[in-house]
Amino acid sequence: MRLLRFLRPLFVSLTLMAATGGAMAADTGFSTLATPVRSDTGKKVEVVEYFMYTCPHCYALDPLMHDWVKKQGDKIAFRRVHLAFSGPKDPLAHAYVTLESMGQLDKVHDSIFRAIHVERNRLNRDDAVLDLLVKNGIDKAKYLEMFNSFGVQTKLKRNEALIAAAKIDSAPTIVIDGRFVTSPAQLSRPGQSERQTQEATLRVMDELVARVLKERAPAPAKK
């Protein structure tokens, strides 16, 4: 699978993980961050997908990811972080955080993917993104107010720091419990279809969630 490489310095290649604090476990399809990057999700296992709307692999994985999240139920706390491919003012990364802050992501998530990968709308400018969102029922005035808000700007900077700390350099990449990093790129094998690679990724994710839950389970009482 072709990796989507980033030009910005904050994206460090996964091939350097052993030197920078991450360790790749042989043949497991995941790596482990030496310094966990996690949020407080209570008893639920945090699952973060780092993705981009323009990434064809993210688009292909999206319906499978939707079903996987639904299957996990209350065991996980799932969220996405959109990589800022073109820098701090990346239109789609900015739009994603804005919609997330408005609580409107579910309303337009599929439409954005479809516009890019089916309708071939590049959506590489803020006005082009806004036009699509308004056509799909997003209130223009409320969107622009949130788009320019201090809260959204702060969250964009926080995401940038999170991406650097988790050493994300390709999409899609999934981080579980702030320490286990997996991706279709890590699980790709010669002669394997993309769908097979995606399914292998989801199996690794199943195993990692189960591992975290097992670690957290209280020890049995001594008799």
Image (spheres, rainbow, N blue to C red):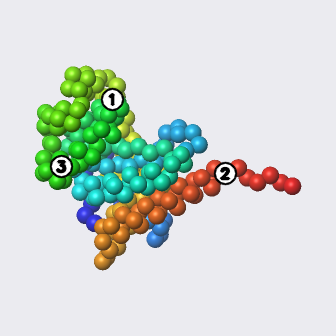
Judged left or right of residue 160, residue 145 is left
- What number is the disc on residue 40? none
Judged from the image, the secondary structure of the residue bearing numbered disc 1 is helix
Q: Going 63% across and 55% down the picture, which residue do you hit?
A: 214
Q: CA distance from mark 2 to mark 1?
A: 36 Å
Residue matched to label 3 = 116
Q: CA distance from mark 2 to mark 3?
A: 43 Å
Q: Quadrant of the C terminus?
A: bottom right
Measured from the top left, where is residue 208 in percent x and y?
52, 58
Q: Quadrant of the N terminus?
A: bottom left
**Dot 3, how many residues are within 10 Å of its Cα: few (below 14), some (14-19), or many (20+)?**
some
Please tell me which of labels 2 and 3 falls first in the chain.
3
86 to 156, vertically: above or below = below
38 to 71, vertically: above or below = above
Q: Going 30% across and 77% down the picture, which residue do you hit?
A: 191
Judged from the image, the secondary structure of the residue bearing numbered disc 3 is helix
Three-letter code for the amino acid on which mark 3 is drawn: Ile
Query: Which mark is in front, 2 or 1?
Result: 1
Identify the image quadrant of residue 220: bottom right
Residue matched to label 2 = 217
Three-letter code for the amino acid on which mark 1 is drawn: Met
Residue matched to label 1 = 102
**Dot 1, how many residues are within 10 Å of its Cα: few (below 14), some (14-19), or many (20+)?**
some
Pointers 2 and 3 in contact (C-beta within 8 Å): no
Farthest residue to the right: give it: 223
Three-letter code for the amino acid on which mark 2 is drawn: Ala
